[in-house]
Image (spheres, coloured by chain):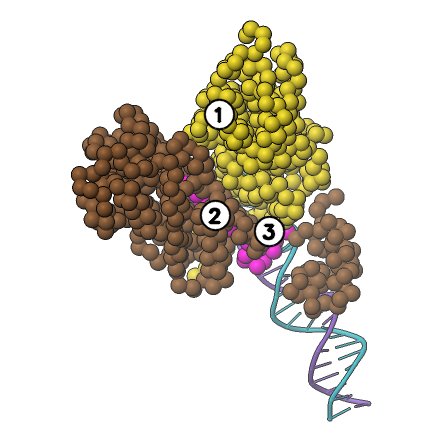
Chain colours: A yellow, B brown, C purple, D cyan
Amino acid sequence: MRTPRLKDVAEAAGVHVATASRALDDSRSTMVRAETVERVRQAASDLGYRVNRMARGLKLNRSFIIGMLVPDITNPFFPPIVRGAEDCLAESGYTLFLGNTDNDDGKERRHVAAMLERQVDGLLLAMARRRDPLVEELRGRQAPLVLVNRTIDRGGVAAVIPDDHAGMMLAVEHLHQQGHRRIGHVGGPADTSTGARRAAGFAEASNLLGLPAGPMVRSEAFAEIAGREAARTLLSRNPDLTAVVAANDLIALGTIEAAEESGRRCPEDLSVVGFNDMPFVDRFRPPLTTVRIPEYEIGRRAAQLLLSRIENPDQHPETILIAPELVVRGSTRPPRLPPSGPPV
Amino acid sequence: MRTPRLKDVAEAAGVHVATASRALDDSRSTMVRAETVERVRQAASDLGYRVNRMARGLKLNRSFIIGMLVPDITNPFFPPIVRGAEDCLAESGYTLFLGNTDNDDGKERRHVAAMLERQVDGLLLAMARRRDPLVEELRGRQAPLVLVNRTIDRGGVAAVIPDDHAGMMLAVEHLHQQGHRRIGHVGGPADTSTGARRAAGFAEASNLLGLPAGPMVRSEAFAEIAGREAARTLLSRNPDLTAVVAANDLIALGTIEAAEESGRRCPEDLSVVGFNDMPFVDRFRPPLTTVRIPEYEIGRRAAQLLLSRIENPDQHPETILIAPELVVRGSTRPPRLPPSGPPV
DNA sequence: GTCATCGTTGCAAGCGATTGCACCGTCGCT
DNA sequence: AGCGACGGTGCAATCGCTTGCAACGATGAC
């Protein structure tokens, strides 16, 4: 016996499908006699009926599905974001499609196409680049979207992102207070807003604190190996650095490796600050000092924002900046040799 | 202008929707004149047409959606599994629904219900318990399912799981070779197949190697805190242990903490072996010796198996055992004081 | 020249739900 | 007693697509 349809329930209850449909929906069950509602619901539960949301969606032009694209769920930074989004969406009866894009344009487009074909009600995009043709194409068209973690230069799109400038200020300030004066930056990819803003924030912070412009090298990717590569360059060009702030935790890890390769230990010979405070970064050797981004909150806020945009599509697109927080652990300490001038 | 339907394409190409439908589908476009096919496809791409898979799904009774349930995507063990599954499914045109269950019966049922309502073509379940009423209800009914990582005692359900016995053998053998003779086990929850099988595997391995039955305590959950709790008990009851094998990496972490609480360092005073080799476990302090499970492969195989079962629903349910591999790192070393007898 | 065949296309039913509208009996009011 | 209002229910269209079957003209065989 196949899975029961509404028609079966209606027949079992001795009513028309229209009545059954109304009886089963809380908001419309008032138009049906209480006794009938009861009879229909009884029949439905007896038969183990579940609505076919595909059919309902077709009629209502609403799928109650949200598509979410992340570069790589395997990067520990993303799962909490996904989790936050999923928790929020589940509360409102939505289900989440997940796709990994690997920062690959082809994959991105394929996933977006698949999701649009499946009539998602909205899109959560965590893989935007600063000039992202795909995002441009999508905006204002079919489904509402909100950007997560990264945004685009042109703005005009709803987004929930970390306050990268503030975060960098926190990091540089911390090092400065410890007495560091020669601080470098291993930046993230230049085509991401996070990479660009953190680099700008680093320069800005140095400037505000009266430090000379610190050297900077960009990592090809927000990943350990790429970070190590970039850090090698930075450290060999600037052997006098006493501290480095990295554009994210993975790059910080690579930086520590690069330092060790050249015989410098962290934190004794080089202080390193990460960004994100992704899970388990406190268990590393050394435990990483980093700028915490509340990932779960970002996911949740992004989902909320998307839901509100689905309700009200003409809402003006807002960007929500999430405040970061410094977490001091073992990878930073005052420099061994004090800088030329006396510490402040 | 709203998103175009097949009807719009058909009109633009001057044909009937039926013809357009056929022209757009590779496998049926042979029944349409080549020139017509061309005309239809041109019109479709001009209009930016995408099929509405909701409508198609309703007609075909096939959604090309797979639902996947994990206890918690935030646990680094799961993302690679999800990734493997997603990669495999995407290749075949399927999309993945993701749900977190937190080992909470209510959440599990709600997610399963939501997925069934959305007409998923199959289910990937990574949260089964040894006697799992939900799994029992599901088997043989609506959607084909395959269990991932954990299975149920009664069997009769397709599953892709690690070879827990072999893994435990590897772990105990390694410690034995290093000279350990008093080895304990911090087991996983007794209601999971992984917890039970690893505990059994531990006992079996000890026995095979001629060791006395090692003491064992069960952790409430596969998590760090619960693991610490259990390890405290184990270590205080058995102060003479020189090594512990944990039921997974998180529990191993908790065990190291518990040891340190009581003034014992790892690996100097206590060797600890984990299980899973989840990401970043090599970066911990100390880097964890563990039994590697190829998570990505498990996800991929599970998805493959599910797909094949969708094609052929009457296939006899098979259990696929994935071979583990020992990864020796810094958390194990020979015991400081050799055991009473001379090492073998 | 006729008829069967084949290639190509159109017709229409149907997938499972929702919903505006019509219908109908009952009730209350005048 | 007659009438309108209203509560409860049924009817039928509709969402966008697929597909078995029918239709139709051209072709080839006899």
Write down the residue under mark 3: B54
Q: CA distance from mark 3 to mark 2?
A: 30 Å
Write down the residue under mark 2: B296
Asked whether disc 3 touches disc 1, contact meaning CB atoms under 8 Å apart, the reply is no
Q: Which residues make up the magenta segment? A: B52-71
Q: Please give the label number shown on residue B319.
A: none
What residue is drawn where x is 59% and y is 17%?
A: A182
The image quadrant that residue D2 belongs to is top right
Assign a secondary structure to mark 1: loop
Residue B210's place in the image compared with A225, above or below, is below
- A125 or B149, which lies in front? B149
- Residue type pointed to by label 1: Arg
Assign a secondary structure to mark 2: helix
Left or right of A312, for residue B217: left
Q: Chain of mark 1?
A: A
What residue is drawn where x is 31% and y is 31%?
A: B268
Q: Please give the label number shown on residue A265.
A: 1
